[in-house]
Each structure stands twice: as C-alpha cells, then as structure tokens.
C-alpha cells in the first residue's frame, strides 16, 4: 500500500468532546428559552384580562411544561452522552487504526531495511567473492611467473653446466691431442735422428769423394756462387714479410726434396729443421682459424735460399679455400728468414725446394 494512502487512513478524527459540545450547548440554550417563553406567556395573561386564562390553568400548564422540559433535557443529555461515547469510541477506533497503520508502516520500513541490508550484504559478499577470485587469479599468475622464472633459471644453469663440461672436455681433448702430437713429434725426431745418424755415416764416406770433385769444380762454380751471394745480399736487405718477386735463376744450384728423406744428409737435416720451425711457431689463433674452415690439405713447395730467405711459395695442390692458401703464405713469410744453410750444404746448393703436404688440426703437420 502506498505511503499516501496509509497517511490518509490514519488522518486524525475529531475528538468526541468536539462533537458533543455543540449539541449540549443547544439543549441548555433551549431550556431557558422554554422557561422564558412560559414565564412571558404567564405575565402576558396576567396583564391582559381578556386573554389571561384562569390562574389554575396557567399553573397547571407551567407544572406540565416543567417536567417536559426536564425530560427533554435529560433526553438531550443522554443523546449528547451517547454521541460523546460514540465519538470517543470512534476516536479509539481512529487511534487504533492509526496505530495499526503506523505499525504496518514500521513493519514495512523494517522489512525494507532488512531487504536493503540483505541486498547490501549480498552485494558485499559478491564483491568480496570477486576480490577473492581476483586475488586468487593474481596469486596463480604470480606463481606461474615464478615457476617460469625458476624453469628459465634452471635451464640457464643446465646450459652453463653443459657448456662448462663441454669446454672441459674440449680442453682435455686438446691437451690429450697436444700430448699425443708432442709424443709423436718426439718419436719422429728420435727416429729421424737415428736415421740421420746412419745417413751421416754414409755421408761422411761420400763426403771424402765429393771433396775431390768440389775442388775440381770450384773454379767453374765460382762465378755461379758470386751471383748467388749477390742475390742473397739483396734478399737479406729486404724485410721478412716481403714477397720475393725475383725471377728464378736457372744458374743457381738447386735441390728438390719431395719427401722427408734424401741421400744428402745435410739437406734432409735442414728440411726437418725448417719443418719444425713452422710447426712450433705457428700462432694457435691461426691454427683455429684455418681448422675451422673446411678444406683439403694443400701440397706446397717452398724454395729457400742458402741465407734462409724465401725465393717462392708455390701451391702444387691448393686447399680449395683462398683464405687457407693465403694463411699458408703468411705463416711462411712471418717466419722468414729461416736458418741459413750449414756450410757443407751451402757449398753444394744455392736454393732448396721443400715440398710438403700441410695439415691443420691442433698443430701444423708437414708430411
């Protein structure tokens, strides 16, 4: 029910005294008027002999009028009292209706407040549940991120450990390879020394015979040696890194060593010393750079003069990679000049051509 209807329902009714007061005042006003009329009539009759009734008639009329007026007054009072009681009862009914309306309004207000409180509680519960869900989602996201970071860190540690182990293995393999290479070189040098010692004994026997031949050819070769010394002097004045562009003279005494052994012991010893100089002095970074490039082992002929200068570097078989071929040239030029010939070898030769196959791994190997 709307609040306007309830307010109209409980509108205050007039008080019972307000209803009964006019009626009581009217009855009280009528009694004096009747008495006054009766008294006025009696006076008029007494003063007017023509119309005045006999005295006993007037008295009787007055006597009759007095009780009637009293009865009328009593009846009026009873009526007024009844009306007052009815008004009082109506007032009580109005007050009760008003109280009931107020009670209904209060109950409706309480119910509305209860419903509003329930709505607010439900809204607060929904907001709290949403906040809990959001917090749960954030916590789960944080846990996932933490798990992902932990996995990445674990993977990084595993990669670092794997790289460290690989580096250690590679270092161990390089060390083993270098030890094996050193052992192989030592064994090769020992075998070469033994072989050279045997060859040296044979060479000493041949040397006696060769001396006689050299004395006979000394005059004939004097001019050739003079030319060779002039060329050697010019080569000595150049820096080791210069590329020799002089034409090869056919007048020079030359020897070619295509392997590691030769009947001429001095020549074989010089070629081995020349190879060891290259194997032991090539920078490791150059080795790694060349070994990292796929190539085939080049076959190279290096012509060395008696003073240790390089006459030419010729590729019989290239590596197939220009950078590798150029690196071989740089290695030879960087180590120039090589040791000069031994006196006995210098008396015989002006140029020695040494042909070897170059192989690159953990070291330079000349076969």
Image (spheres, rainbow, N blue to C red):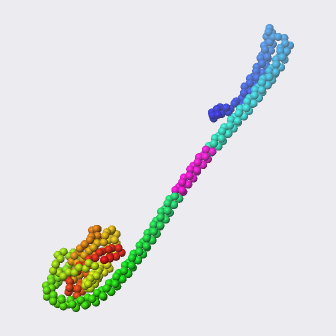
Q: Is residue 209 left or right of residue 76?
A: left
Identify which residue is drawn at 43% across, 69% down: 163
Residue 310 in percent (x, y) is at 22, 78
Residue placed farthest to the top in the image?
A: 50
Image quarter of residue 84:
top right
Q: Is residue 186 magenta?
A: no
Is most of the magenta stretch helix, strand or loop? helix
Residue 4 in percent (x, y) is at 63, 33
Q: Is residue 128 magenta?
A: yes
Q: Is residue 214 left or right of residue 183?
A: left
Residue 139 in percent (x, y) is at 54, 57
Residue 264 in percent (x, y) is at 25, 85
Image quarter of residue 271:
bottom left
- Residue nearest the observer in this picture, 142 or 61: 142
Compared with 171, 54 (above or below) is above
Q: Is residue 283 left or right of residue 120?
A: left
- Residue nearest the observer in this picture, 245 or 69: 245
Identify which residue is drawn at 68% across, 35% down: 101
Magenta extent: 118-141
């Amino acid at each position: 029910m709307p609040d306007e209807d309830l307010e109209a329902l409980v509108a205050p009714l007039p008080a019972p005294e307000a209803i009964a007061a006019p009626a009581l005042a009217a009855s009280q006003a009528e009694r004096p008027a009747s008495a006054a009329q009766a008294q006025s009539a009696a006076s008029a009759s007494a003063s007017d002999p023509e119309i005045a009734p006999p005295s006993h008639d007037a008295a009787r009329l007055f006597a009759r009028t007095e009780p009637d007026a009293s009865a009328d007054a009593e009846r009026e009072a009873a009526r007024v009292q009844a009306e007052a009681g009815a008004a009082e009862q109506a007032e009580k009914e109005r007050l009760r209706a008003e109280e009931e309306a107020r009670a209904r309004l209060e109950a409706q207000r309480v119910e509305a407040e209860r419903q509003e409180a329930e709505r607010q509680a439900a809204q607060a519960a929904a907001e709290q549940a949403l906040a809990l869900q959001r917090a749960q989602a954030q916590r789960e996201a944080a846990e996932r991120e933490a798990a992902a970071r932990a996995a990445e860190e674990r993977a990084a540690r595993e990669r670092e450990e794997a790289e460290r182990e690989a580096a250690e293995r590679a270092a161990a393999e390089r060390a083993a390879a270098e030890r094996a290479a050193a052992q192989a070189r030592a064994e090769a040098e020992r075998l070469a020394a033994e072989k050279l010692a045997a060859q040296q004994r044979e060479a000493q026997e041949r040397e006696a015979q060769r001396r006689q031949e050299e004395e006979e050819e000394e005059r004939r070769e004097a001019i050739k040696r003079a030319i060779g010394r002039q060329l050697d002097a010019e080569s000595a004045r150049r820096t080791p890194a210069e590329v020799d562009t002089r034409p090869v003279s056919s007048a020079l005494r030359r020897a070619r060593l295509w392997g590691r052994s030769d009947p001429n012991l001095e020549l074989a010893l010089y070629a081995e010393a020349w190879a060891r100089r290259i194997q032991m002095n090539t920078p490791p970074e150059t080795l790694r750079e060349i070994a990292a490039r796929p190539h085939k082992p080049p076959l190279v002929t290096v012509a060395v003069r008696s003073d240790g200068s390089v006459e030419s570097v010729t590729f019989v078989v290239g590596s197939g990679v220009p950078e590798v071929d150029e690196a071989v040239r740089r290695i030879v030029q960087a180590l120039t000049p090589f040791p000069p010939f031994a006196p006995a070898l210098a008396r015989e030769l002006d140029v020695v051509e040494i042909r070897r196959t170059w192989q690159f791994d953990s070291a330079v190997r000349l076969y």
